[in-house]
Amino acid sequence: MTTPTTYVGIDIAKAKFDVALLNPLGKYRSKVYANTPEGYNQFLTWLQKHEALDAHLCMETTGAYGRGLARFLTQQNPLVSVVNPAQIHAFGKTELVRAKTDKADARLIARYCQMHRPAHWVPLTDEIVTLQALVQRLDDLLGLHNMENNRLETAEAAAQPSIEAVLVTINQQVDAVRRQIQEHIDDHPDLKSQKKLLLSIPGIGDNTTATLLAFINPFERFHSAKQLVAYAGLNPRIRQSGQWAGKTPIAKTGNVLLRKALYMPALTAKRYNPVITVFCDRLIAHGKRPMQVIIAAMRKLLHIAYGVLKSGQPFDPEKALA
């Protein structure tokens, strides 16, 4: 594949998307299209008109708003990148960008693409898209359950029957979605085999397995356990300058659902997973605080999960402790 000489930045919104074509002479061409299938085709015709079908296209991660366009573009041109908005924001700071319009943002994304050549985006398979949607829905339902439970504790007697009725409905939906998730995993051989491997790790159960399968696939994109830990936002954020060294919190610039899913399993693994138990005891002996120990256990669980998925072998505590 030849190195592209033309770069296109795409700024996505709910109803439209702005595009900026940056040509080899450093000149821009800008356009706005509806965020619809018809708009996608019009954009493709515009690229063809300007002999830019082989351009490197770049857009920010915008969830549902940009998913359709990203999939459409990858069917026409493999040079499509979908990047974290925080990266574009940080790049804009290096340029001291002051203008904040959709047109200016599209041009900023095009310049970022030209300078950094981000990795190409690989669309998720249909089964992973479905699994992510179900896991996200379950998390939403559990959040609603907590809110209604909190309201029930402080509600007047007249309002309590209504809250209790809502809680019954939420509980029914939680059970239904959990069944749907497990049936979906069992219906796909690759997911089912990965589930079996993850369940061999003490501390990891069905709910955590579902979240891991939803958000670490395609697994091949992670070349090391360290990359997976960073993706979950559990890597340490070191703060040091000269002789000064501040506290070292976790980065949190990662998948929040993965972090949420690993917290309770880490507490369980600390007691019942021999590898995690020994690991945590060593940290406690070195004076680490309780929350530091739990976060370290979450990281360790991800390392173990990476190992079993990479090797295709179930967890063996004796081998891990050897």
Image: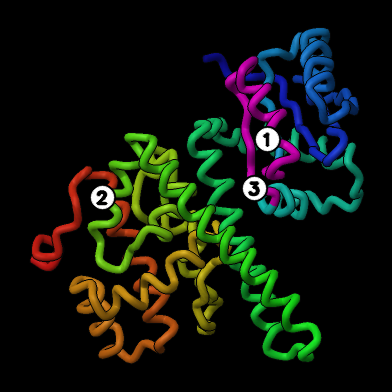
Answer with the quarter of the image where residue 47 lies. top right
Mark 1 neighbour class, 10 Å CA radius: few under 14, some 14 to 19, many 20 or more: some
* Residue type, mark 1 in image: Arg
Q: Nearer the viewer, mark 3 or mark 1?
A: 1
Q: Which of these two is toward me, 56 or 208?
A: 208
Q: Amino acid at mark 2?
A: Leu
Looking at the image, do the residues carrying marks 3 and 2 touch, with CB atoms under 8 Å apart? no
Count every numbered label the image shows and give the total. 3
Are discs 3 and 1 less than 8 Å apart at CB? Answer: no
Q: Secondary structure at mark 3?
A: loop
Q: Secondary structure at mark 1?
A: helix
Q: Which quadrant: the C terminus?
A: bottom left
Residue placed at 88% from the left, 41% from the top? 102
Which mark's residue is nearer the viewer, 3 or 2? 2
> Residue 116, image x and y in percent?
62, 38
Q: Nearer the viewer, residue 98 or 127?
A: 127
Magenta residue span: 61-85
Q: Gap in Å between the C-alphas at discs 3 and 1?
A: 14 Å
Answer whether residue 99 is magenta in the image.
no
Where 58 sits versus 230, above or below? above
Which residue bears the numbered disc 2? 197
- Residue at the image point whose x is 75% and y is 20% from the top: 24
Instruction: Please tell me which residue is depicted at 44% across the width and 72% down the height of the picture.
Output: 263
